[in-house]
Amino acid sequence: MRSVSIFGATGSVGESAYDLLIRSGGADRWRVVALSGGRNIARLAEMARTLRAEMAVTAHPELLGDLAEVLGGSDVQVSAGADAIVAAAGMEADWTLSAIVGAAGLPPGLRVLERGGTLALANKESLVAAGRLVMGTAARHGARILPVDSEHSAIFQALGSDDLENVENVTITASGGAFRDWPLDRLEHATVDEASTHPNWAMGQRITIDSASMFNKALEIIETHEFFGIEADRIRVLVHPESIVHAMVTHCDGGSIAHLGAPDMRHAIGYALNWPDRAALPVAKLDLAALGTLSFRAPDETRWPALRLAREVMAAGGAAGAALNGAKEQALDDFLAGRIRFTDMAHAVEAALDDLTGVAGFTTSPGDLATVLDWDQRARQSAAAWAARHGGR
Ligand SMILES: NC(=O)C1=CN([C@@H]2O[C@H](COP(=O)(O)OP(=O)(O)OC[C@H]3O[C@@H](n4cnc5c(N)ncnc54)[C@H](OP(=O)(O)O)[C@@H]3O)[C@@H](O)[C@H]2O)C=CC1
Ligand SMILES: CC(=O)[C@@H](O)[C@H](O)COP(=O)(O)O
Ligand SMILES: [Mn+2]
């Protein structure tokens, strides 16, 4: 029986993974080692009971009593807190899904790699904040990372066993998010509700807003660079409103291999779960005749300054990825709390990067988790300070 763990089980990606496990035999087919969640205790408990998980962990120590109560009478062990999540990640499992949102996903992901496990990685923030550390840890411990972000799963599938040397460039697509066609002067007045609607994908609120600001694609450019080891100038972004083509690999001979599929994360998760085999998945098959037209256009960096920031961060290297991610998470918190406007998020992130550029150590890639988290904190403070100065305008 294969054993699996899911970190971030109660989220959008976690729910998709749960659905795949249930549809493919549930507890009779899979030995579920650990499931983690945050505030959604009722759902975490329900999943743990149904899948007969060995361990259920909430990120919030004050909710441990609630979790223990709901799981009373079951064999599921319970624990709580960030350290407990890392401890659960240290429990042997054949396959572990990293689907916590934000930099909080980094420590458990690293723990899986340190035990030489297979990490199916949805948490792109890990690679943005700590690409060198994550990839180095995997290499040192003989661990495997399988990409789950849809574009990166698509590149992985399109590449197959091809040699990167023969690849001229890779293209990741962007839907353009909620404000793709809004007049530019309306953007600054965009509300949280308006930014929280995605044209094609059903996802958690944070990544949905990141899609609207294009910070999601900014993170994904860096994720591509760190995971595949492709130079920044060989990574392209194409706006593709239909979200059917997820990525494309263009070879030196002029041929391009694109990956197409319905916008449903169960494909990328299921691909990673079954890798290196393929299995039937409950995903709608494409009907290109019915779709008729697929459209593409170049991204506009005036509308989406996040794309420029990603390029600057890759050029800077060192701790710039950790700073970008930390500042972006803080700016998103500030937007969600109504402290800054939608368009201010990019200003706050840029200000944080400017503040930290030139600080001793910034040009060095963080070699350990503590250093990553230190730059993450500094960037959050800097972005928060920008919001305090400029918010409420
Ligand atoms: N959603 C998607 O389709 C895609 C997502 N991704 C990436 O996957 C990750 C998850 O995204 P998504 O599923 O949308 O996110 P959600 O917000 O839907 O879910 C996040 C999960 O993480 C838990 N969580 C939140 N904060 C913490 C914390 N501080 N510590 C531990 N656990 C926490 C939540 O618990 P609870 O809800 O119980 O509070 C929930 O289980 C992100 O990195 C995202 O960028 C990548 C590609 C596609
Ligand atoms: C499903 C997935 O991988 C998301 O990251 C998706 O790419 C978001 O859509 P955008 O193209 O709008 O960023
Ligand atoms: Mn993606």
Image (spheres, grey):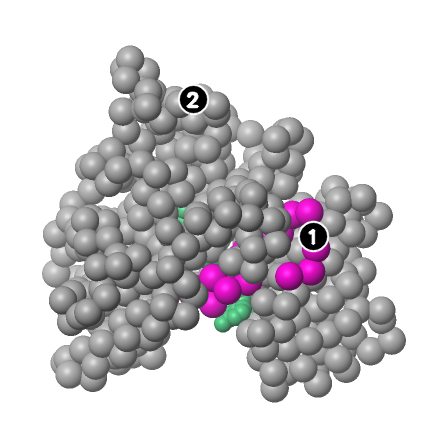
**Can residue 144 be spotted in the picture?**
yes
Q: Position of residue 43 (x, y in %)?
A: 67, 68
Between discs 2 and 1, the one toward the N terminus: 1
* Farthest residue, direction front: 140
Location of residue 14 with respect to 163 vertically, above or below: below
Q: Residue at x 48, y 25 (%)?
A: 160
Front-most of residues 212 and 353: 353
Mark 2 vs ligand 3: CB below 8 Å: no
The residue carrying mark 1 is: 93
Q: Could you say which quadrant of the image residue 324 lies in?
A: bottom left
Taking the spot 30% from the left edge, 45% from the top edge, the residue there is 221
Instruction: Give amino acid for label 1.
Output: Ala
Residue on which disc 2 sits: 162
The quadrant holding residue 235 is top left
Image position of 200 (left or right of 56)? left
Task: Look at the image and tell me whether residue 22 can be seen.
Answer: no
The amino acid beneath tag 2 is: Asp
Q: Say what secondary structure mark 2 lies in.
A: loop
Which quadrant holds the N terminus? top right
